[in-house]
Amino acid sequence: MKVKEYFKAGLWTENPVLIQFLGLCPALAITTTTLNAFTMGLCLTLVLIGSNVLIALLRRLIPHHVRIIFYVLIISGLVSLVEMILSTFFNDLYNALGIFVPLIAANGILLARAETFASKNKVLPGLLDGVAMGCGFTIVLVLVGLIREVVGSGTIFGYTLFGGISPLSVFALPAGGFLTLGLLAAAAQFFRNRAKRGSHDGTV
């Protein structure tokens, strides 16, 4: 499998949020600002890369009947490490993300990639999968955060837009997270279906 195929899967065909609908909790809860969304995406990507690499490295040593326990222990340890780094060097961001940092350990993307990919592949494919899936997750979170911040709050990275007027303040509310993510998922599905129809028409 080529590098571009990993990224095609992570960013588009198997995007963990828009296609597999994994990790929806942070995608809905902390995407009120672009910075929060990017920070959460980066934290999860680092944990995903680390867990994929470690599980791929230890896959032959982990007893099959207790593998899930080992996966959870590895993921939890990495989340604790990321949490300590974030709280020490970026305390304001850590406080803004709150409980959602330790809750990364419960994110379905991590366990899903551990079980379906990392445990069945070598270290390099595991690393590439972690990077690609993490990037796909982060990009969606940043898009949701950008739309909600600009349209819902009338700001971007703390700078005021539209003269301080919030165009559609509903996007800053919890319902705005569902609405934004739903619109992005619908758009992704539309373009996927369009691409499939185009490929079928080309083969006729």
Image (cartoon, grey):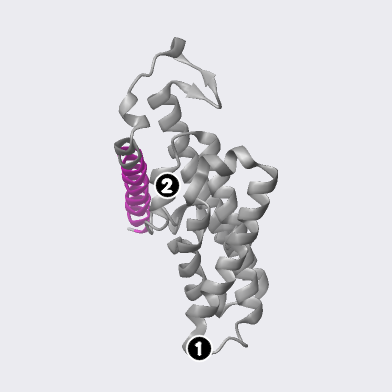
SS label for mark 2? helix
Q: Is residue 61 magenta?
A: no
Query: In which quadrant of the rendered image does the N terminus lie?
Result: bottom right
The label on residue 27 is 2
Residue 52 rendering spot, x and y as whole percentages:
59, 69
Residue that protrudes farthest toward the right in the picture: 89
Task: Identify the amino acid type marked 1.
Answer: His
Q: Which residue is mark 1?
A: 64
Residue 117 visible somewhere in the drawing: no
Residue at the image point whose x is 39% and y is 51% from the top: 25
Quick check: 169 above or below 195? above
Residue 91 rendering spot, x and y as whole percentages:
63, 41
Residue that protrudes farthest toward the top in the picture: 163
The chief SS type of the magenta part is helix
Residue 35 rendering spot, x and y as whole percentages:
55, 36
Q: Is residue 194 magenta?
A: yes
Q: Which residues are magenta?
A: 179-203
Task: Identify the amino acid type marked 2.
Answer: Ala
Who is closer to the viewer here, 19 or 34? Answer: 34
> Going by the image, does 159 lie left or right of 26?
right
Query: In which quadrant of the rendered image does the C terminus lie?
Result: bottom left
